[in-house]
Amino acid sequence: MAILEVLRFPDARLRNKAMPVEKIGSEIRRIAENMLDTMYAENGIGLAATQVNIQKRVVVIDLSEKKHDPLVLINPEITKLEGCETMREGCLSVPDYYAVVERAEAIEFNYKTLENKLVTTTTDGLLAVCVQHEIDHLNGKLFIDYLSPLKRQRLQKKFDKREKQQPSVL
Ligand code: ZN
């Protein structure tokens, strides 16, 4: 068990594009376990490998209230998008910031499980939003990229300021 460091915006490594997982073995299982530990420790409902500086297409999600229903998606891919809905989103990599984002309401997607089983499924609501948000991470995209240029400018300023104010920890 290990808690990994979550990269925070504006860290350029959040823009890395993750590579497909070729072999689902002990290394990927360990990565998924550590990602789940990290997500639970940070009180998140989803985490993509890109956020912990691992360039592999691995996503973990747990929408259950008691945090006992982990979902591990290896090489997830959206094959169909339908409808449109807006939801207020946040992100462990953009702390203390929330914004309304427009996404597809329902999706069809597939992924491999840790047991190397290919699953194709459809979903909507929060899980659909979460899967879209996390796959964006694997492609180097953040939810704030959907904001208007003005809002993004304000946000960038806020985070630049915050970085400058941070004391040096030696
Ligand atoms: Zn996120």
Image (tube, rainbow, N blue to C red):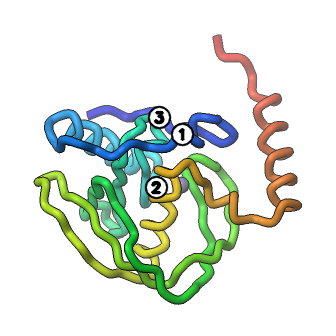
Q: Amino acid at mark 3?
A: Asn
Q: Is mark 1 within 8 Å of ligand 1?
A: no
Name which residue lies at 28% across and 44% down: 21
How far is mark 2 from mark 3, CA to CA? 17 Å
Q: Position of residue 97 (x, y in %)?
A: 69, 57
Q: Which mark is residue 44?
A: 2
SS at circle 3: loop
Q: Is mark 3 within 8 Å of ligand 1?
A: no
Q: Position of residue 55 (x, y in %)?
A: 42, 38
Q: Are marks 3 and 1 in contact (CB under 8 Å)?
A: yes
Q: Quadrant of residue 115?
A: bottom left
Q: Nearer the viewer, residue 42 or 142?
A: 142
| Residue 108 vertical placement versus 32 (above, below) | below
Q: Is mark 2 within 8 Å of ligand 1?
A: yes
Q: Amino acid at mark 2?
A: Gly
How far is mark 3 from mark 1, CA to CA? 9 Å
Q: Which mark is residue 16?
A: 1
Q: Which residue is mark 3?
A: 53
